[in-house]
DNA sequence: TCCGTTGTATTATTTGTAATAATACAATTA
DNA sequence: TAATTGTATTATTACAAATAATACAACGGA
């Protein structure tokens, strides 16, 4: 599994793991129902402590992104539509907040559209 | 000066002070050349340690947002155009990165425009 | 001249959280 | 039976933010 971690980042490693796996799901790189690495394997792969991966997996399970089946392994949930939609909604929200900031500074619709890559 | 700090946030207080003052400048609430509170006053106001405000002021001075005149006080620089332009550029950058994410997930131009508040 | 305020600077300490280390247990599978 | 899985606990380390407690020099007003 291709996960990029910035070990110098202020963002905790366990949160980066959460975001990366969410991203892979959104991009359909991780398919519904598919198995992801065991806690120990991923920890070894990323050169971090198993507890760190465990913490990420706990959060992802609470977010209904993955499901842990004891002794079997950990899997992407079957229905990822909610996860993907939330990802889209969250992203749109960030953009709209930034647009509001720009408008407060004084930019109008045309000003903004001209600067966007669309 | 109206500065909002989230004391529970993961973002350090000194960084929040930097952002807030940058915002007030971008919004023309803080005018070029105008005086801002002394380190001790703002620290008292925000209920934080003077060292924390000092750290924020140091960063703002390096960013050419404010200038400290010993024994006189601290002031917004005379020319804030660069500061404001940088703020706009940074914001646009964030938006464009988010747009790229949405496109990777599979949304096209129309999809995105429909969801934006523009 | 004296006092209060300004920015500046230094050192030590506290605090909170991330991350690691080191295990241990139960259940499943080959 | 041995290896692997998720789960769980406790202690420790590491690091950065924030605080605490001062001290100094310079300016301005009373």
Image (cartoon, coloured by chain):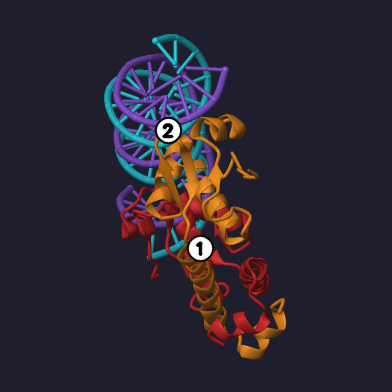
Chain colours: A red, B orange, C cyan, D purple
Horizontal relation, residue B85 to residue B110: left or right: left
Label 2 marks a residue whose chain is: B
Find disc 1 in the rendering and name its residue: A19
- Mark 2, other Cα within 10 Å: few <14 / some 14–19 / many ≥20: few
Q: Secondary structure at mark 1?
A: helix
Quarter of the figure with residue A98: bottom right
Quarter of the figure with residue B111: bottom right
Horizontal relation, residue B101 to residue A106: left or right: left
Nearer to the camera, A3 or B46: B46
Horizontal relation, residue A109 to residue B43: left or right: right
Horizontal relation, residue B19 to residue A82: left or right: left
- Foreground disc of the pair 1, 2: 2
Label of residue A110 in the image: none
Q: Secondary structure at mark 2?
A: loop
Nearer to the camera, B78 or A58: B78
Find disc 2 in the rendering and name its residue: B71
**Where residue A4 sits in the image (x, y, percent)?**
38, 65
Q: CA distance from mark 1 to mark 2?
A: 48 Å
């Amino acid at each position: 599994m291709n996960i990029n971690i910035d070990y110098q980042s202020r963002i905790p490693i366990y949160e980066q793991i959460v975001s990366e796996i969410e991203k892979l799901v959104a991009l359909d790189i991780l398919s519904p129902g598919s198995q992801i690495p065991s806690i120990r394997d991923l920890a070894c792969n990323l050169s971090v402590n198993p507890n760190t991966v465990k913490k990420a997996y706990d959060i992802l399970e609470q977010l209904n992104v993955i499901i842990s089946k004891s002794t079997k392994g950990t899997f992407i949930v079957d229905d990822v539509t909610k996860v993907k939609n939330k990802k889209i909604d969250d992203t749109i929200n960030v953009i709209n907040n930034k647009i509001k900031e720009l408008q407060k500074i004084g930019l109008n619709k045309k000003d903004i559209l001209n600067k966007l890559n669309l």
